[in-house]
Image: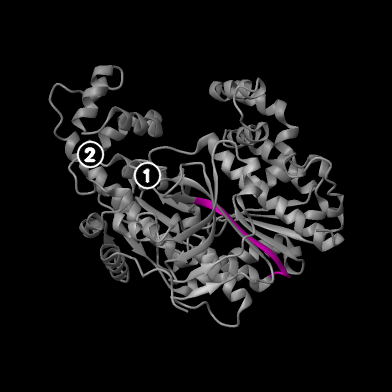
Amino acid sequence: MERTVPYTASEEVELYLRTYYSLLRTTDAVQIRTLEEVHSGMNALLHQRARAQAPDMSAFIYALLRLPDCVHQVSEVVLGQSASIFEKAGVGDVWSWEQVSARARRRRCFYHPQEETLACIVASRSDIDDVIPLLTAYQIEWNKLHMLLGHLRGDLDLEDFPRDRGVWKRLAEELMMSESDITRWRSILEGSFLSRLKEIQAKKCRFQVRLLNGSLIEYSRATNAWWSNIASKAPGVLDRPIYFVSSNPHSLPNLLSGFAIKNQQELEGYLKDAGHEELMDEWRQIQSQKVPSSEENFWYYALKKYLQSDDIEEICERRNEHENRVGITRVDSEHYFDVDAQVIRLSELVPEWLDPRICAEGEDVRFLAESDALILNIDYPLGVAAYNILTEVAQHVGDVLGVYIMGKAATLNGVVGDIMIPYVVHDEHSRNTYLCPRAFTAADVSPFLIYGTVIDNQKAVSVRGTFLQNRRYMDVFYREGYTDIEMEAGPYLSAVYEMIRPTRHPVDEIVNLNRLPFDLGLLHYASDTPLSKGKNLGAGTLSYYGMDPTYASAVAIIRRIINLERKRITGDT
């Protein structure tokens, strides 16, 4: 069938991709500086001022949040799919190194301080398309700051910063950035801000990167090892019907277990003791109905904060015990790429402990005790890893009753916090345009969304990387009515195609998925507005208000599953 949009990857993006993949074929390390010119020439939406003398702080902070905190001490980054790959290449037993993580990107990484080496576990080529631009953007902006800090006026002493407000303002001027930029940067680095300034002043950034094995076979082996871990800890997934959900590790367990709601008093005590005055003020306003926020979402956020604090072993153990009692088994991916899972046995859920939004008033869900179905919920993967994972799952589980994809996206017509429901997805990997069932409408989600808007009948495009778009590239899609930009839906839909057809997914075709033998639904919540200057998660974060679209989407998915189970078990519609 003829496709609906032209192949749109710009020449600049294609050149960038060809350049770094050809370089990564070498067995030696590649200097990131060799990519700086082609990266800058791409004119990415996330890095539009790469060639400017002034730092592009939105791009720098975006990269900073998606690379491990130790990256400023790293000289070499090594990419591989498994521990054995690193050992065979002579890198060493990376699992014995210090495990490190980024604040805004899930990727299992290990750091060797003596060798100044960062080892990253990659689940698919999408990780490469993410890491390389992040490192390049970080290095470009670091070196701009290095040059500016090396030419500070003699009367400007970093030791006076930030005690003197006048020095703060002058430093921002010297670094050719706004006060809001330097404030945001400092808030991220917290107590290490002054030492990081001195480090940037003292040395240039000179990353080199090495890809150990980029073969499809190794990605397949890594995915198989990830799945075997789940199957060994939750054997029911091999023969019972399942609903596959790609979301996050907290929303479904919180909504279904009741743990946070049952422990409100302890969570409130934690917030007071930890000095979270802003959150406590928010809670008082919710109680007095001065703000319309969800009480349940507030406690879910408080639990998230609690689990990020020190000495969390006891609360984690109690949470896991409670969840086990209501049929929820957590499976951490400790020795594989960083995609955790939960297996939820619907028959063991306690109706009285469910989030009140799940059931309409007077609705009886005790029929779930007769269900033999499971929910397999995974922490959403990055890009092509979605295809690998769903393909692996579908090969080994019992009947698939539903596939639900929930995740972050950029929006070209909405605002941060909106929810988009696409019925058309163009996948830049396969160049297919998928026509999807209308499992969800705005009416299914909007009753549970407080701050944003639900926009259905949308068209989404699954891109190859967050940096791999420029304005010309986006304009083509926008003119064709594509307003939802994300990374996982297309690869998932390619796997869905192979679940129902005897052949591998096609390339460059229109694919109609409207007559599937199982349910399929997509929900995306907006975290970026890339066509608006600075409106991305490098400039701000969803924070507590990110709970609103996340939980509205999760509630809609659970309600959909329960209604399908009612029909399957009782025959009622």
The amino acid type, in three-letter code, at marker 2 is: Leu
In the rendered structure, does residue 189 fall within the stretch colored magenta? no
Residue 277 in the image: state x and y as whole percent.
Answer: 55, 21
Which segment did they paint magenta?
397-408
* 147 vs 60, nearest the viewer: 60
* 418 vs 351, nearest the viewer: 418
Image quarter of residue 266:
top right
Residue 109 visible in rendering: yes
* 327 vs 226, nearest the viewer: 327
Residue 237 in the image: state x and y as whole percent.
Answer: 73, 64
Dominant SS type (magenta)? strand
Q: Which residue is mark 2?
A: 145
Residue 250 visible in rendering: no
Crowdedness near tag 2: few (<14), some (14–19) or many (≥20) residues, C-alpha within 10 Å: many
The amino acid type, in three-letter code, at marker 1 is: Tyr
| Residue 85 disc label | none
Q: Which residue is mark 1?
A: 62
Do callouts 1 and 2 mark residues in contact (Cβ within 8 Å)?
no
Side of 508 where 206 appears, left or right = left
Q: Earlier in the sequence, mark 1 or mark 2?
A: 1
In the rendered structure, does residue 407 fall within the stretch colored magenta? yes
Query: Mark 2 falls on what kind of element?
Result: helix
